[in-house]
Image: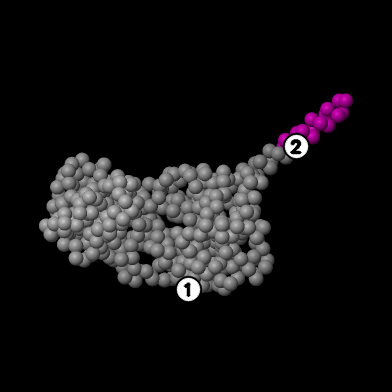
Amino acid sequence: MFYEKERSFKMNKIFLLSLFCSLFILQTSKSQQTEYARSVVNLLASDSLSGRGYVNSGDKKAAEFIKNEFMSFGLTPLGNDFYQTFETSVNTFPETVTVEIGNQNLKPGTDFLIDPGSPSVNNQFGIIILTARDLLDNEKFISELRISSGKFLAIQPYERSNFSDSENETIKGKINFLKYHPQNPSKGTIILTNDKLTWSGSTRLNTKPTLIIQKDSLKSGLKSITLNFQNKFFKNYSTQNVAGLIKGKNSDSTIVFMAHYDHLGMMGSDATFNGANDNASGIAMLLSMAKYYSENQPEYDMAFIAFGAEELGLIGSKYFIENPLFDLSSVKFFFNFDISGTGDEGIQVVNGSVYKSAFDSLSEINGQKELLPQVKIRGAACNSDHCWFDQKEIPGFYIYTLGGIQAYHDVYDRPETLPLTEFDDYFKLLTLFIAKL
């Protein structure tokens, strides 16, 4: 009896020690994945990279970092020393941006945005205020236009739900006329809003400036506005994709990992759009994959592509698909990582219903391993770099995480706000799925 108890005690000790070691190794592996991803996000979304846009060569600094990571993992260069260069037009605001209403200096990025296609302006202007109802009243609208020379037209916030579909289309058309049409006699347009301020990039230069202002930020009435900002428009800005390859045991097929590294850059010297979730997190996943498969030779060749100029209209990926660096007919499957930093509510799989058997396999693995809260199916959507691959009928998924922070295309999408909640389990799910391809 004593011997059996002693033997049982020893076996329990061995089992517990083995379990502890397994958990320690698993936790260490998981923490290393997150630790590396965090270091990537912290660097790419730091102020030193100027929002990875086209001010202070932010795009080039980001591309150089990715190239150096590819080199450290031993990837084979695709393109010219990992770079595939292309040109794009782009409008930027590299210098100080000042907007003053009354005695109030508005804060860029939080109180207001400049429409990304706006030209330079430096002056004080009177303001004419219009409502959505005024835009629908042609007689009223034309009357106000006639007296708007030398002034800005300001559009009050309105609720779309208060108008019919046709009325909303008319309102939108009138606002676009004010923003973009050269026959608008006013000096510019102000769009007042109660919504979150969301910026974008522009490859065009408009004839007149437009501002989007948070109405709640105003401490006084809109009688006049003083503006001082300078744009710099590049007709042929040279930027790049970054691409590398890991040779597999079987080179008759290629698995492609893609993510865009660019973001919106800066609006003047005081507003940086760091883009931690969009899309430093996607690059963190791409680089984590490159690191993993450089240490664990994959079954097939693996191409890793960090696209530029996605935020300007999927320009880098379009250039790549028109000038591929390898035979696209060899692609077995692709993964596009765009927003990978949360996951509180799981992941969304674009093209899930298009490639249903692949989606079912991914979902089954997730259920068996209990990794993510959900793997949600979605159809095709031309909303990121995978779009051009879809048009070539190349199979693959665009995956993004769900839940968590809502910062997007704003000054709040910073490293310190990004939790990387499910990064480890998301990474594990992908590697398990890829092993079954």
Q: Nearer the viewer, mark 2 or mark 1?
A: 1
Q: Nearer the viewer, residue 34 or 156?
A: 156
Q: Residue furthest left?
A: 147
Q: Nearer the viewer, residue 7 or 145?
A: 145
Residue at point 57%, 49% (across, down): 375
Q: Nearer the viewer, residue 60 or 113?
A: 113
Callout 2 crowding tier (Cα within 10 Å): few <14, some 14–19, many ≥20: few
Secondary structure under tag 1 reads helix
> Dot 2 corresponds to which residue?
15
> Dot 1 corresponds to which residue?
322
- Can residue 153 be seen in the rendering of this structure? yes
Question: What is the C-alpha distance between the residues marked 2 and 1?
Answer: 57 Å
Decide whether residue 257 is among the magenta residues: no
Segment colored magenta: 1-17
Callout 1 crowding tier (Cα within 10 Å): few <14, some 14–19, many ≥20: few
Residue at point 64%, 65% (across, down): 300
Q: Tell me which amino acid carries mark 2.
A: Phe
Q: Position of residue 296 (x, y in %)?
A: 65, 58
Sequence order check, earlier mark of 2 and 1: 2
